[in-house]
Image (cartoon, coloured by chain):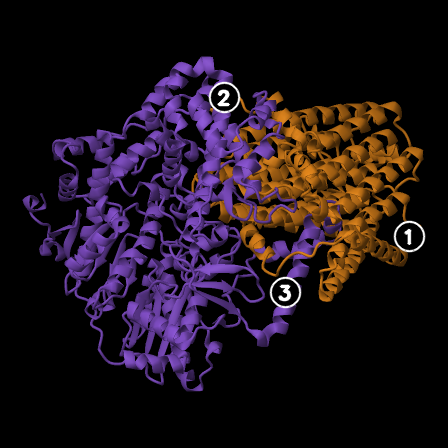
Amino acid sequence: MPIYLTPLFAPAVLLISAVVGFLMPGRRRLPPKLAEAAALAAVVSAFVSLGVLVFQGPGVSPVIESYGIGLSVRLDAVSAVMLLLVTFIGWVVVRYAGTYLDGEARQGPFTGWLCLTLASVLLLVSAGNLFQLVLAWIATSLFLHRLLLFYPERVSGQRAARKKFVTARLGDVALIGAVGLLVAAYGTSDIGAILAAAKAGAGGGLAVAAAGFLALAAVLKSAQFPTHGWLTEVMETPTPVSALLHAGVINAGGFLLIRFADLMLLAPGVLAALVMIGGFTALYGSLVMLTQPAVKTSLAWSTVAQMGFMIFECGLALFPLALLHIVAHSLYKAHSFLASGGAVEKVAAIRRPGPVAIPKARAVGRAFLSALIIYLMVGLGFGFEHKSPQAIALGAILIFGVAYMLAQGFADAAPRALTRRTAVYAVATSLSYFALQTAATWVTSGVLPPTPAPGPLEWALIMLAVISFGLVAIVQAMFPLWAYHPAAAGLRVHLSNGFYANAVFDRIVGGWSARTAS
Amino acid sequence: MSHKFASALADLQILGTAADRAARAIPLVWPLASSVAVNPFLGQTSEGLAQAGARLARVAGVAVTMPRSWYREKISVGEISDEDLLAAWASAPAQQRPVDLTVLKAAAASDAPTRAALPTVADLAKEVSGIDWPGLIAERFGAWAAGYFDEGQALWQAPRGKGAYAAWRAVATHDLTPEIAGLPGFALHVSEAPESAVAAVARVADRLGLCEDAMETYFHQMLMTQGGWSQYARYQLWQAELAGGTDQTITDFLAIRLIWEEALFIRYGVQITDRWSSVRASHALPIEPTPELVIDAILQEAAERSSQRALAVTLAEPALGQSEDRPVVQAAFCIDVRSEVFRRAFESVCPDIRTLGFAGFFGLTASHRRFASDVEELRLPVLLNPSVRSRSGGSELAAKDQATRFKARAKRAWGRFKLAAVSSFAFVEATGPIYVGKLLGDSLGLHGAGAPNDPPPRLDPALDLETRATAAETVLRAMSLTGNFARLVLLAGHGANVVNNPHASALHCGACGGYSGEVNARLLAALLNDPEVRAALAPLGIEIPADTLFLGALHDTTTDRVTLYTEDYPSHAHAGDIEQAKTWLGAAGRIARTERALRLPRAGQESSVARRSRDWSETRPEWALAGCKAFIAAPRTRTAGKSLEGRAFLHDYDWMQDKSFSVLELILTAPVVVASWISLQYYGSTVAPDVFGGGNKLLHNVTGGIGVVEGNGGLLRAGLPWQSVHDGERLMHEPLRLSVCIEAPREAMTEVLSRHDNVRALFDNGWLHLFALDATGRIAWRYTGDLQWTAMDPAAGDGTRPPLKLAV
């Protein structure tokens, strides 16, 4: 039905505003205000699309074709959620950039590239066919490249952009390969038809290979180890770009896997690989982050970790949770980047109320036990019996995090009031987590496949994941007790350098060559 | 070659002296939580602009004046007149200046040659290897230093406790990055370096064949390549010396940077050795200003003379007469140039309002603890040590104090939960959606910062009556406020009201150590409301009427709102006076905002100023002290009613009351010096933004809670961000060195200068200009250095130009 073309309104207005941006490049002119209006219109159009979805149900628009390239919209719970997310963060970022870049000589082009990036992300998340998907995917990264080079003379900006460029082109090749295989396997470029066929188990070896390439594209897009280097250097360009990444750019890898969830289930081996890559990146990123003294760098490492967690969830076939993660993380991280100017005051506030109470081993033990009890209680309330082992394992991992909160309150030196408050936080966090999980599953039911029962490989991975996250959680909770031991000093150095993956990448692409520096 | 110098190098004292001189050539930078302006030429005040320019060009390729085009523009529109040029020319050293005005003007018509620093070993290695070694060194050094100085951004902090050099070696012997980038064996090289920093410096100096003469500028250059990090190390030394100790950090930094040079010298020695010998020889040459630098300095002086002419005209205008009757309200503000706009507006609301200017710490050097805080904040000028301790909230608020702390600690625990490994995933999945609200709230500017509102501060421990009375007397005399007290006397500190701004403290009160000034103002109000103190003051000749109420206040410089701390001294009798004052302050605020909105980009009108202060994406919430060019110490009657455009520091001073000229001495050695730091910080950030400026706000990345780097890391950026001196289209700060105008006998000023060499150097070397005002407030005498004065043509005051020959 043509009404499903509604989501195209958003990229259309952004496109117009981008054109105006390029036509009026100078200072203090129309583009920022116009772009903000366009971004706001995009938010409205996303809500209208949501209305269409609610009242008309999911559907696909007719294909608008020209020169053999089709534009079609697939409107369902996944694309609607992404549309809302991307347009909302897009509006926040465009509005912020309008003031933030005021007085810049090239604010017009910046606004233009910003709008183009958003428009292509919107086309990506609403794509109904493979060609649109590939084109939007590639366009997103090319436009982002221009934003990364907003200050073209910055050497370290060039270094980051070059690494991003290499990674992105590899990702493009992987996606094109995947699409070729999908067309060969299913004889159509319509995403809905492919998913339906995949759900029925069709596709064979070609489909499995396609899943492999999709996974590769996702891993490259979402800055998984060892291709994360560019992401931690992206603050070479104005702050709004770092926030923009969370509007469906850096998390497009997760979106791709969610979009093709039915297909991914045909390839358990690929999913297993994603569990390992994502799980490792999550732990790696979150540990490196602990050592980072600069606020935006720290946030970027946190994004690496969170992207790992998202991929990890996809690998466990917990697609609704991965979607929830994309939404929750994007909102949080976009805000954190934009508000990073408050870091001076935040750090100053840390020491005011007195020293931190450090939990000893016994307090940590009690905290983990209490967290498990909270988990059992809340879990029983929400009904464990409906949950897959994967979901239960994931819940356990998150509850390890809650245990860290409790451990701080259980420290011997902590006053009772603090213990009480942290306990309240812990229970509230657990409740909120389960409620959101339930909501995400409910919203996407019928669109995203249920998690299949784990086989031996999956069980092994689940155990591995729970044990490794659990160990890190315990180590983290007892952190101050060991982190300043001389034996840990060398480890800290290597960790703070991300185990040199980025240094090696720099060496390979000639990041420190004076040719780029001059 | 090394044998030749071996005996000289054996003398570690020579080396230590050179290292120390290099260290003292570096300016300081305070941490951003409590930052104040610093003169970037602090280490060069014993020489003039041209000489300092020659030095800084050699070590960092820095320009110390604007590009010639800037002066050309001013000459072509007649802002800089021939008389200005001639006068500036005449005051330059005869053997260095161009032969006459024609040559000078011809030079002004062409651009100055670009200045490049002498290359370092790392620069030479870059040329022969094609690897960006200076960039890599800056990146690696920054990565280490950021961790070393981190005040709490990282949950896993770098080990502290040992000196910088030892801490760096512990890291550098593990770090594999240099070797991956192409410097094999660097970690081993570091591990084999001497244990002590001075010994390491000696070894490298020997290896590089440095003679004694070459050391000073080469070491200076080494520290300059570490940008703001060296300045932060210099700050450690400053703080240590202020407290009577010493600190090695900056020497350690020198050793660290030299070890890199040594490693690269070993690696590329054969290829660079010839060039290095010539560089080394250049470092050994004495510093001489080039003719071009002398011309630049003359042009700068001419620009300043032009602005002084304008100032003389303003000061010569008849002032608004103020009656001698008892004023209805008196309000003391900080001397900060932003107060001038507000004071003028406030006085215009009602003729019975009097304002006065004094350094915003109001004479109380307090080490203060906020409510529910353990942290001591130094709310005083950074040149001084604290003399009193204070805290907000006493024992009667213990329960509330405790509860507030618990809340803060829970918040802190939540913050750690948010950041820690593993728990960060739980945090995101459980609470991420809440951020829709935060994004909306911040985007729409729903949350402002609001004025600080701690419980009243009190001295803790309390002082005995004698000390309190002496303190009160000293402050009142220094303020020249010893009689004719109004019923209501407001003591207004000032602070900025901004959000999401790493440089917020730079907008607060510099005299209060980069904090907002309400604490000191409230402390002084408490002191002066104390009946015992008043009783003790009376015999000393200061009679404060019983119906006079002092109230602490805070002038919000971003929005020009004034908060009165009326709850500190609830007075029924003064309710009417306070209401009236509030109305007047509100009206003055509107006038001041209207004036400020004209200069702020996109402000449009008065009402949009407040919105901008809540905007998290605003990089120019206010212009702070941009534009400052004059410092005037005189009774307010000399300047009342005249617009000084928010560009003058106004200090109330009545020399007739200053019998021993002790207040004059105080003014010249404290507020004037602080004002010079501010003026020269703006100057340095404008003429040399790459080296002495804080960089681009759009790229700022707060590091360790103490400073900012641009982008990923590398050098700490000290000084003012570009957005703070430039609105995108034009400079908002004209780089002019401050003109200090004091109404006092010349002999008294000469006498003070003769006793304070450091202050005298500022004037003698042209970092500040000094003028004596006559009894009507007109500029009458110019200080020309060496304790000499020349009369100014009084005719200049009424707007006519002096004949050319007079100016020569």
Dot 1 falls on a residue whose secondary structure is helix
- Dot 3 amino acid type: Arg
Colour orange belongs to chain: A
Task: Answer with left or right where residue B629 lies relative to residue A276.
Answer: left
Across and down, in percent, residue B437 comes to 65, 57
Colour purple belongs to chain: B
- Dot 2 amino acid type: Leu
Residue, far bottom: B573
Between circles 1 and 2, the one closer to the viewer is 2
Q: Nearer the viewer, residue A98 or A23?
A: A98
Identify the mark at residue A384; answer none if there is no mark.
1
Label 3, on which residue?
A: B405
Identify the mark at residue B264; answer none if there is no mark.
2
Disc 1 with disc 2 on a shared chain: no
User: Which quadrant of the view contains residue A227?
Assistant: top right
Please identify the quadrant where the C terminus of chain B is shown. top left
Across and down, in percent, residue B665 comes to 26, 60
Across and down, in percent, residue A358 comes to 71, 54
- Dot 1 amino acid type: Phe
Between circles 3 and 2, the one closer to the viewer is 2
Q: Chain of mark 2?
A: B
